[in-house]
Image (cartoon, rainbow, N blue to C red):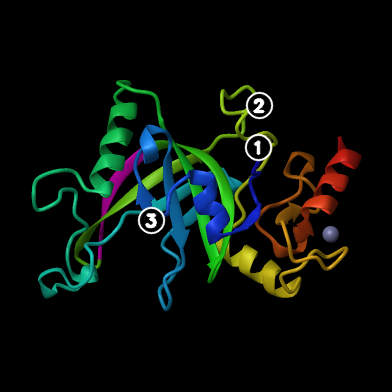
Amino acid sequence: MMNQGDIISYLDMCKNEGVNLQRGMNFRLRSRHSVILMSLRPGAPYADRIEQEGKILIYEGHDIPSQKNGLHPKAVDQPEKNPGGGLTQNGLFYRAAMQFKKGESKPELVKVYEKIRSGIWVYNGIFRLIDAWREDINNRKVFKYKLELIDEMRSHLTELAPGLDHHRVIPTSVKLTVWKRDKGACVICGSKDNLHFDHIIPYSKGGSSLVAENIQLLCARHNLGKRDKIE
Ligand SMILES: [Zn+2]
């Protein structure tokens, strides 16, 4: 069972989804929910951003694969369709967002994982895809997707993901600062297994997700112990 903020290995993530995750955008993985991988591109500013105190994630679409026709992926529009005419992952997510906006379907459910280091991933939770658009950035069209964190206890996904209430996504920069400061280990016992990004003061009690001072690394045992004390 995984909770938002859990730190997992690449293998755990693949085991959890039942497939080898190779690409960033995975629409309707195994005909169930969709999966998005956030990953920092070296040397680039973070294109994915967090809004409304960690409730909203703005995710950027994907470029053409490099080496295709020798075109630089950052020099051309992000594709909506494949050369054969079918929708790309960008196109599939975009269409789902439009169908939701027109009231034709329920929002697509998207699980989001984020890579913070080689082999080290964070589960950011389950989101609803509520909007999508294209922006002109450096003279090319880039897809943007708006995802809203699900934190309703009454959600039908509660059984799949308990404890999602009152949680907020921690920005990448804060995660990296905390990881370095706590040296990749539980601040209580020093364990490096089953770690979790913990809000020192819970969001529901007024604690912020946006500052490293309110976030710490805890192992599963100490995270559970703390939860019992609060509730
Ligand atoms: Zn511990």
The answer to whether the residue labelled 1 contacts the one labelled 2, judged by CB atoms less than 8 Å apart, is: yes
Q: Amino acid at mark 1?
A: Leu
Which label was assigned to residue 24? Answer: 3
- 57 displayed left or right of 103: right
Give, as a single range, the part of the protein colored magenta: 131-137
Residue 51 visible (yes or no): no
Q: Amino acid at mark 2?
A: Met
* Marks 3 and 2, how far apart at CA: 28 Å
For ligand 1, give the image quadrant: bottom right
Residue at numbered disc 2: 153
Residue 187 magenta-highlighted: no
Which label was assigned to residue 164? Answer: 1
Please say if 154 is above or below 71. Answer: above
Please say if 167 is above or below 197. Answer: above
Q: Amino acid at mark 3?
A: Gly
Q: Nearer the viewer, mark 1 or mark 3?
A: 3
Question: Which quadrant holds the N terminus?
Answer: top right
Q: Residues within 10 Å of mark 2 (few under 14, many from 20)?
A: some
Q: Earlier in the sequence, mark 1 or mark 2?
A: 2
* Marks 1 and 3, how far apart at CA: 23 Å
Q: Earlier in the sequence, mark 3 or mark 2?
A: 3
Q: Position of residue 229 (x, y in %)?
A: 91, 41
Secondary structure of the residue carrying tag 3 is: loop
Residue 137 visible (yes or no): yes
